[in-house]
Amino acid sequence: MKKIFTVFLVIAVLCISAFTSEAAKKKKVAVLDFEYGTIRDRWWPGDWNIGKGISDMTVTQLVKDGTFSVIERRQIEKVISEQKFGASGLVDASTAAQIGKILGVQYVIIGSITQFSIDTQTVDTGFIGRKLFGGGVGVSTTTATVYIDARMIDTTTAEIVAVAEGKASESKSGVKISAADFHGAGHVAFGSKGFEETILGQATRQSVVDVVKQITGAQGGPESTGGAIKAKVAYAGEGKIIIDAGSKQGVSVGQTLYIVRIKKEIKSPTTGEVIKRLVDTIAEIKVTEVDRGSATATIMKGNIDDIKEGDDVSSTQSL
């Protein structure tokens, strides 16, 4: 029994050690409350802390992604309170860097919500609708729109090392008595299941997911190999290209890549080894979306019909 306990103890220690080692590789990041720059309107009564809500959702998504080690909100609030940062409600890159240094993180994410709205367009049902339902009835389409701008600041240099834009809209059609009868997510709290099920919650979630993908993709993550990108085309069709390399290989949103095909290999007459490959550039592509193991791109130059699955992809026009 004692031997079995010892074996379990050793396994537990090894697992904890491996987990600690992996966590130590990750760079630390803090997410400050986003600035809410949009105009409040009739759709949600009361005083929502939208900047805090979206910041919390961003933290959750970053933790799920696993690229960074994320600092808890309580530590951030303590530093801001003690140092009297952000008293004006606005935090610039320099102030964010100072906060990050005190927290001991490599990066700080700040941002603003440039749109957070619900809009309903109603088409009058006409004479029949008025006869059946009375005045003010129409077929309505309600659209929730959320735009988020985010910036990642290097705490050592106070430079912006990555930017991200999250834009999403969700719509729902139905018959509404009047706009006043539809309050969207106005009575539902951020982070709740009820909020997630609303079109506003869905648009917010998608915007946050887009922001995190762009930030982690730009950074490359702890597994980034560095140097030139070498990958293969995994899919080509419907106007998009998918490659078998993502943020862990260093691919980032907005990056220009080239699809190339070997035309000729030049070999050393002495050793017989390949010393250079002459290639044809089939297409120039731009990365629009990045996951940890794949990336999606659109064609900037070239024809999608000329691209084949298995073609080489490079960050330079060479192999």
Image (spheres, rainbow, N blue to C red):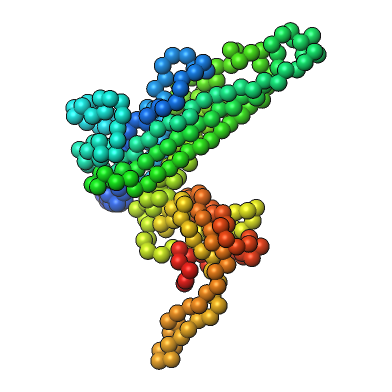
**Between 264 and 87, the one nearer to me in the picture:** 87
In percent of width and height, residue 267 lies at: 46, 86
**Between 147 and 204, the one nearer to me in the picture:** 147
Residue at the image point whose x is 52% and y is 25% from the top:
117
Residue at the image point whose x is 56% and y is 27% from the top:
144
Above or below residue 255? Residue 148 is above
Q: Is residue 196 visible?
A: no
In percent of width and height, residue 196 lies at: 51, 28
**Between 129 and 73, the one nearer to me in the picture:** 129
In percent of width and height, residue 213 lies at: 45, 45
Q: Quadrant of residue 303?
A: bottom right
Above or below residue 141? Residue 148 is below
Residue at the image point whose x is 53% and y is 80% from the top:
264
Residue at the image point whose x is 32% and y is 33% from the top:
32
**Left or right relative to 132: residue 277:** left
**Left or right relative to 105: residue 313:** right
In percent of width and height, residue 119 lies at: 58, 23
Residue that extends furthest to the bottom in the rendered view of this protein? 270
Q: Is residue 184 visible?
A: yes
Q: Quadrant of residue 150?
A: top left
Numbered circles on residues, count? 0
Above or below residue 312? Residue 286 is above
